[in-house]
Amino acid sequence: MARRSRLHIPQHHSRPGEEPDFSYLETSPAGAVPRPDVNARVRDIGSLSIDLVRVLDDSHVAVGPWNPHLEVPDLQIGLRHMLLTRIFDERMQRAQRQGKTSFYMRCLGEEAVSVAQGMALRPKDMLFPAYRNQGLYVVRGRPLVDLMCQLLSNTRDMCKGRQLPVMYHWAEGRIFSISGNLTTQFPQAVGWAMAAAIKGEDDIAVSWIGEGSSAEADFHHAMLFASVYMAPVILNIVNNQWAISTFQGFAGGEQRSFAARGPGYGMAGIRVDGNDFLAVHAVTQWAAERARTGAGPTLIEHVTYRGAAHSTSDDPARYRPKDDYEKWPLGDPVLRLKNHLIALGEWSEERHQALAQELEVHVTESWKEAVQYGTLTDGPRLNRDLMFQDVFKEMPEQLRKQREQLRAEQGV
Amino acid sequence: MPQMNMIQALNSAMDIMLARDPNVVMLGEDIGYFGGVFRVTDGLQRKYGEHRVLDTPIAEGAIVGAAIGMGVNGLRPVAEVQFADYIYPACDQIFSELARLRYRSAGDFWAPVTIRTPCGGGIRGGQTHSQSPEGIFTHVCGIKVVMPSTPYDAKGLLIASIEDDDPVVFFEPKRLYNGPFDGDVNKPAVPWSTHPKGEVPDGYYTVPIGKAEIVRKGSAVTMVAYGTMIYVCEAAARALGIDAEIIDVRSMVPLDTDTICTSVKKTGRCLIAHEATRFSGFGAELSATIQEECFWDLEAPIGRVAGWDTPYPHAFEWEYFPGPLRVAAALQAVMEAA
């Protein structure tokens, strides 16, 4: 009994077996978008949320008003961090396939977002990441061994075995605990920023979600509080086109950019080429200065592509063309920064190979150390009593009893 | 009779209802083209179209809120929340709206919404893919709460839920999707094809909401459980050689007090088991009800065995899970008391 439905269903541009089609993607030429003052009024900078800020042009040259004019050593460090992030991801993916850990999530293709932003911020700025921001840890210098120990839920796991792999945290490094529940960190980051303003401190808060997660109510809560209180916060939507199997049209990206929600709430919105290291760095600096000087929050949409599966539990071949990522019009952030450095005469294929090898060795050695502290399946294991700690600051009697009961059950 | 695992049985239930009733629609994250992260809705969008099996944005509150609106406008929505751990953003819509709409409008408005959601641990999901929050929902007046433990019941209960004019939260114990699991992770997995309750008719049938099932007759003690814990209880009773009567609650709201209390009056002893945390868990309601109804027939205090009162820890999954060892110890205690 078929009825005629007038409901609009967002349509995927290409499905498995079809040619990748990115005709929906609106871009701007590199260097074409003006860079307003950091204290510009929201009403005067609406086009920033529609256009696409790009710095690197097709011949790998940095052009236009958003060129952050970074020093060569900084560019090389950025390349190194992105490459390390990628090599780490590949190794951890293999470790999951080998059964050493239960789960992993790569950020393939999105490395510039975390690395360029992490480098553009100050060390005391507070970060509220999602689960695909491992580059922040690389930038802030957390040893890979520590991340690996979390992935292995072993005796040196910072989470004491309580969290799914990749749900890191780092209080000293000012990186907040990752939640498996989506978007919860967004209003929390706003609250942290409000506290900084209340306390008269000039640290800012920065948070990330995927475009899919912007559908959650917490996104709107965060936007509202950020704009009402002009909180010193940068809210990032990493539009990697995919929320597991549904493309960005299902999150509301079909009719309007995600960045345009910024002006909708009365805050600055910037749409940036998320695979352009220089552009991401530049807009982050702009937004950070705007926040730090009390000119208000910024919503940044990073237009990028989720090159990998959602997680090790996902198979994208079921819902998108196999060569979709290869055909992504904005390219590969690692390759683009590498080519820029080569164009500057400050890098070469040989140096790149040597760097990759060095980082491979670093990852391998870190892994060798990490597994000494145990894996999910092989000892040494965390003390099971730890399960009962930290539910409350002081362990209540009821949990003490349950801990004793488990000890008796396990014969220890 | 065809053999189905629980995923196929649930899929068959929805297939049948989409075919029988043009007002049945499905909505949820990744349920359409992809067929669901657990494949439960596989093929339904292809068969019934993307206007009846809708992929949605990641917004559980919007999924349930929209389902209510659809229900008020004459549709019969089946909403999927991808993991029970992610249902909380929808709780205002469930608790304050869906559960009370009929009451506050004196019966003039109501929404026949079914909310399917996979629950429970044992899949290395950590604290955000392992929870059993059924007890929270049983505390809200106006929603029915069910959890099947077999493919046969899964299909029959889901059809009954979709047909029910009251809202139903339908918990799917995901560790049972592919086979009965007795809590011993070192044993090889048992597929549903080797289990009698893996036999599922192809066509339409219902399992009534509000009826418990005696899954094992016995005389020494009554074990009351649901979901994954049914198989753990069976294993524990077997290991101790105790002639336990095992009751699958199946429907927490409404609760089949008669079946449960008749059994307890007969055996004089009772152990309640669930995977959810113990404190204020559904076991507390069961225990209170049984105590009120069966006090003079009880030969020992009612026992409760459950998950610890902590979040579900990734690295200690099997130390957390109330497996056969813990259930056997609790069963022993109930048998030895008084």
Image (tube, helix red, strand yellow):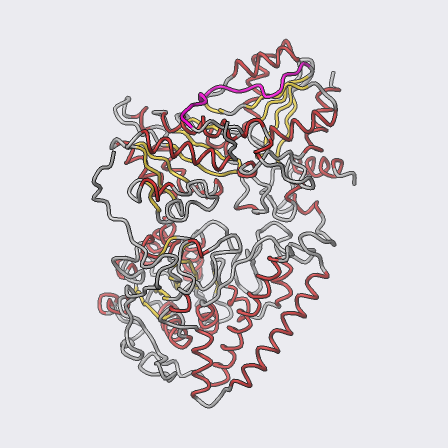
- Across and down, in percent, residue A363 comes to 63, 70
Q: Residue furthest top?
A: B296
Q: Quadrant of the N terminus of chain A?
A: top left
Which quadrant of the figure has residue A4? Answer: top left
Magenta residues span B203-219
Give the total of numbered labels. Answer: 0
Q: Depth check: A291 or B235 in front?
A: B235
Outermost residue, bottom direction?
Answer: A345
Instruction: Place residue B24 in its image quadrant.
Output: top left
- Residue drawn 73% across and 61% down? A372
A153, above or below A394, in the image: below
Q: Magenta stretch containing residue B209, yes or no?
A: yes
Question: Could you tell whether A319 is left or right of B122 in the image?
Answer: left
Q: Is residue B62 left or right of residue A162?
A: left
Location of residue A167 with respect to B114 vertically, above or below: below
In the depicted view, which residue is nearer to us: B74 or A162?
B74
Residue occupying image coordinates x 42% and y 65%: A323
- The quarter of the rendered structure image containing the C terminus of chain A is top right
Determine the main secondary structure of the stretch shown in magenta.
loop
Q: Decide: is A161 above or below A295.
A: above
- Return the x and y of residue A10 as percentages of the image width and height: 29, 52
Find out whether residue B213 is within the magenta segment: yes
Closer to the camera, A189 or A95? A95
